[in-house]
Image (spheres, rainbow, N blue to C red):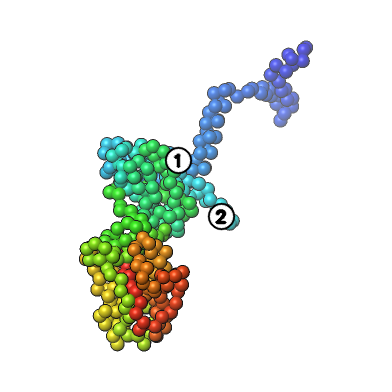
């Protein structure tokens, strides 16, 4: 027999006296159809094990990460947006897990130009949105600026990739486990006002600081702000830079409530100085003049900047029309019983303690 004939024949196994019974075992190749079915089953198993969780987006049944689902929003009318959430495996010490790492929104119509999209995710039963990135950021805001997609408010820690009618919001450090995400919502709304250094703020002043991450602010440090604006020196109800004593009480320390230096503490410092016994509310002092100012739009939350706020004012002094004739500007940061901190605007921005009874320049600011 030729060798090729031997190779082409099916082997015939004749096992004698196997358990006392003669049995013939004919080995056959699996059919092509059966092999294909096995391939499909294996692939399906692989996909199921790599997709970490099912989620339900607003309506309908659960869908897998990596699959798109349609949803309308206010600006899209009858046009369905297609949302495709994705998960990635993040390695951590001793193991790892799947995290909700990005979401792709496509098929966005032109009727959504100049609108904001807000994306949130929820767990199985809670009405509180899950943190998505930056440890605690629980919403992803994307601005549609005429078909160009930009990061919205408080979106540091997120990146945007895009093409026509499509954007993907990527979470640099995702924090929501895929297994905890059961519902995703998307809303559209009017585009929020975005301010830049030099823009006119809601108080009618000039923006001189834009935070990359919102900061704590307010009279009792219970608010969140992103911008600082300085009183304008032209137009209606303009401020006039003037040299003033710091306060009406120039010999007694106020303490911690007036010694904040970081951005966001200026308002609290100023109120503490104004409310100090023994002349803190004396008119015509830096702290009381700032609080009395109302600006072009009649707002009552102007104050003397803290040291770090004043430094930002120095950095952008050209944008806010600082008068070069004035040398030193007051901060609201007290340094001791007799002194508060000033910054040398007429020079290199040096920081000094100065007697509260020495006249220095003032520029009121506000935070929002």
- Tell me what residue is drawn at x 38 percent, y 64 percent: 317
Task: Identify the image quadrant of the N terminus.
Answer: top right
Disc 1 crowd rating (10 Å Cα; few below 14, some 14-19, many 20+) is some
- Tell me what residue is drawn at x 58 percent, y 22 percent: 31
- Asked if 272 appears above or below 139 in the picture, the reply is below
Local SS, label 1? loop
**Lateral position of residue 237 relative to residue 339, left or right:** left
Q: Do the residues labelled 1 and 2 touch (CB within 8 Å)?
A: no
Q: How many labels does the image show?
A: 2
**Where, by quadrant of the figure, is residue 218 drawn?**
bottom left
**Where, by quadrant of the figure, is residue 220 drawn?**
bottom left
Residue under pointer 2: 92
**Lateral position of residue 347 relative to residue 277, left or right:** right
Pinpoint residue 268: horizontal percent, then vertical percent.
34, 74
- Tell me what residue is drawn at x 27 percent, y 43 percent: 74
Q: Nearer the viewer, residue 365 or 349?
A: 349
**Lateral position of residue 224 relative to residue 177, left or right:** left
Residue under pointer 1: 66
Pinpoint residue 278: horizontal percent, then vertical percent.
29, 87
Local SS, label 2? strand
């Amino acid at each position: 027999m030729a060798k090729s004939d031997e190779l082409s024949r099916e082997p015939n196994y004749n096992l004698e006296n196997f358990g006392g019974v003669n049995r013939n075992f004919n080995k056959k190749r699996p059919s092509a159809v059966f092999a294909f079915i096995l391939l499909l089953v294996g692939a399906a198993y692989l996909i199921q094990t790599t997709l970490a969780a099912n989620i339900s987006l607003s309506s309908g049944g659960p869908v897998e990460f990596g699959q798109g689902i349609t949803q309308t929003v206010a600006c899209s009318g009858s046009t369905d947006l297609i949302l495709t959430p994705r998960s990635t495996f993040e390695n951590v010490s001793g193991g790892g897990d799947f995290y909700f790492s990005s979401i792709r929104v496509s098929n966005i119509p032109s009727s959504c130009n100049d609108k904001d999209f807000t994306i949130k995710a929820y767990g199985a039963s809670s009405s509180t949105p899950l943190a998505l990135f930056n440890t605690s950021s629980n919403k992803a805001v994307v601005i549609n600026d005429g078909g160009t997609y930009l990061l919205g408010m408080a979106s540091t820690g997120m990146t945007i990739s895009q093409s026509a009618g499509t954007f993907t919001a990527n979470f640099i450090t995702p924090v929501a486990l895929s297994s905890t995400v059961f519902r995703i919502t998307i809303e559209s709304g009017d585009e929020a006002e975005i301010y830049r250094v030099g823009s006119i703020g809601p108080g009618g002043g000039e923006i001189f600081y834009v935070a990359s991450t919102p900061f704590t602010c307010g009279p009792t440090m219970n608010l969140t702000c992103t911008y600082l604006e300085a009183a304008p020196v032209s137009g209606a109800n303009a401020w006039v830079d003037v040299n003033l004593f710091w306060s009406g009480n120039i010999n007694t320390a106020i303490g911690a409530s007036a010694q904040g230096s970081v951005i966001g503490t200026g308002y609290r410092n100023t109120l503490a100085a104004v409310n100090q016994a023994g002349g803190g509310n004396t008119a015509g002092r830096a702290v009381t003049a700032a609080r009395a100012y109302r600006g072009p739009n009649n707002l009552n939350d102007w104050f003397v900047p803290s040291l770090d706020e004043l430094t930002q004012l120095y950095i952008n002094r050209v944008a806010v029309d600082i008068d070069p004739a004035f040398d030193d500007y007051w901060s609201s940061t007290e340094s001791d019983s007799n002194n508060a901190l000033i910054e040398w605007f007429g020079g290199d921005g040096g920081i000094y303690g100065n007697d509260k009874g020495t006249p220095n320049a003032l520029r009121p600011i506000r935070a929002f």
